[in-house]
Each structure stands twice: as C-alpha cells, then as structure tokens.
Image: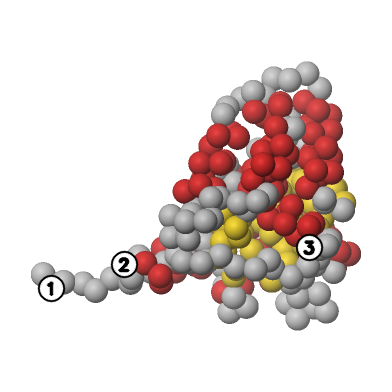
Amino acid sequence: MPNQELNPEHKLMPFETSSLPPGPWLVFAPHADDETYGMAGSLLKASEEGMDTHLVVMTDGALGGDTENLVDVRNGEVHQAAEILGIESVESWQQPDRGLTVSEELVDRVCDKIREIGAASVFFPGPLELHPDHRIAALLVWAAIQKLGNDAVNPNAYSYEIGVQNPVNLFIDITLQRPRKEQAMAVYASQNDENNYEELVLSLDKGRTFTLPAEVSHAEGFYLYSKEELTTSLKVVTHSIIDLYW
C-alpha cells in the first residue's frame, strides 16, 4: 500500500495565540458554570480591554447535584461568578436540565438576544462536548445564526471547550488571568462538590499549550467558523475538520 501524505501539525492546530474576538460578546452557556469552566480567562481578558460581555444560561441546572434549592443556588453562583468576570448582563432561560431541545421558539429567542445585544461575537459549546445539553445548545445557536442570514446583526460564531477537547483554530493566552479564573471557578461550590472540575479544567487549559510558546502557561481553545461553513450543518463542518487528520 503506498504511503499516504498526511497534513502537518500546523494544518491541524494553531502554533501561536490570537487576539481577542471583536465585541460585544454574547456567550450561550447550557448550564450555570459552563461559561466559567470554558472561557473565564478570555472573559476576564475582554473585560480588562473594556469590551462588553453578556451571558445567557439556557437551562435551570436542576439535575446538577443534590444541593437543597439547587436552581436558586446555581443562579446565585452564576451572578457571583459574572461579577468576578466583568460580565455586564446575565439572563437565565430556565429550560429543563437535560431537556434542552431544538425548537423554533428557542431559535427565535436566540436570534432576538443576538439582535438585542448587537453581538459581534457569539459563543456556544463545541460540537464534541459530552453532555447532550451542550450539543443541543450548539445546534440552537447555529440555527439562529443561519436564520439571521444577512440581518443587520451578523456576528462571528465561535465554539468553546468546556469539559473535553473540541475542534479549535485559535487559542487565547490566559496565563495572567488563570488565578482569577480559579477564583471564579471556586464560586461554583455546588458543582465542584460533584467532581474535581477545577483541576480538570486547568488540566485542559494547560494541555492546550502543547503547540504554543513556553511562556504561555494556560490557554483556552476556540473554533471560529467561516461564513462559508455557517451555510451548511454543524455536523458536516465537524466531520470536515476531523477529515483534515486523514
């Protein structure tokens, strides 16, 4: 069988960090905590640069543990974390935990929120996340951005990593922001009691520096989708990214 020439590393992964995406930012988090575990360092960096950032929490998080009055507890935690991260507004849509679905009503609600904020950059979970709510959130935002089409508000679309590695084509250096990311993660006591999420997240951020300069101690990974990619399905785009390895 003849040797097959495969793509070199730089075709698969960035070898340098990027500047921040343009603002205002609108982050869609399936649950209260996903925004912090996934991209707290970048949110802190955006706040430091005077950029407006906004957050929508899509579910009530009711199944995230046995804490009494968990929905209220998690709602309090997200507002506390948002204050640390410099997030300007937080909205909770209170959809059922593990019951998030793709519906025309929710797609329209995402569209309306993007227009309301005038978002230049919209963030949603990566397509290879394990929790079904994470992947449904991605599909909802994807459908909304497609529906906006050539609307006056035509944001850039980014996916972010929460619990596992996803397709990425840009890294944000969060070396200086890491201690405050840890502070924000610590706010989520109701979730950190369920698993060692803080340690796992920092390990993910550390692992993302494999192709980066030695002075970058931690980085958060994102995928910026091209306008052409946004005309097709998220499933097709994800498969095309994986096909680059072969």
Residue located beneath label 1 in the image: 2
- CA separation, marks 1 and 2? 14 Å
- Color scheme of the displayed model: secondary structure
The answer to whether 65 appears left or right of 74 in the picture is: left
Instruction: Specify the farthest residue to the left.
Output: 1
Residue drawn at x 83%, y 37% as measured from the top left: 80
Find residue 57 and report its horizontal and vertical position in percent. Answer: 77, 46
Q: Amino acid at mark 3?
A: Glu
Question: Under tag 1, what secondary structure?
Answer: loop
Q: Quadrant of the C terminus?
A: bottom left
Q: Amino acid at mark 2?
A: Trp
Badge 1 vs badge 2, beta-carbon distance below 8 Å: no
Question: Under tag 3, what secondary structure?
Answer: loop
Which quadrant of the view contains residue 171?
A: bottom right
Find residue 30 and report its horizontal and vertical position in percent. Answer: 69, 45
Residue drawn at x 60%, y 68% as measured from the top left: 18
- Which of the two residues, 19 or 63, is positioned nearer the viewer here? 19
Foreground tag (1 vs 3)? 3
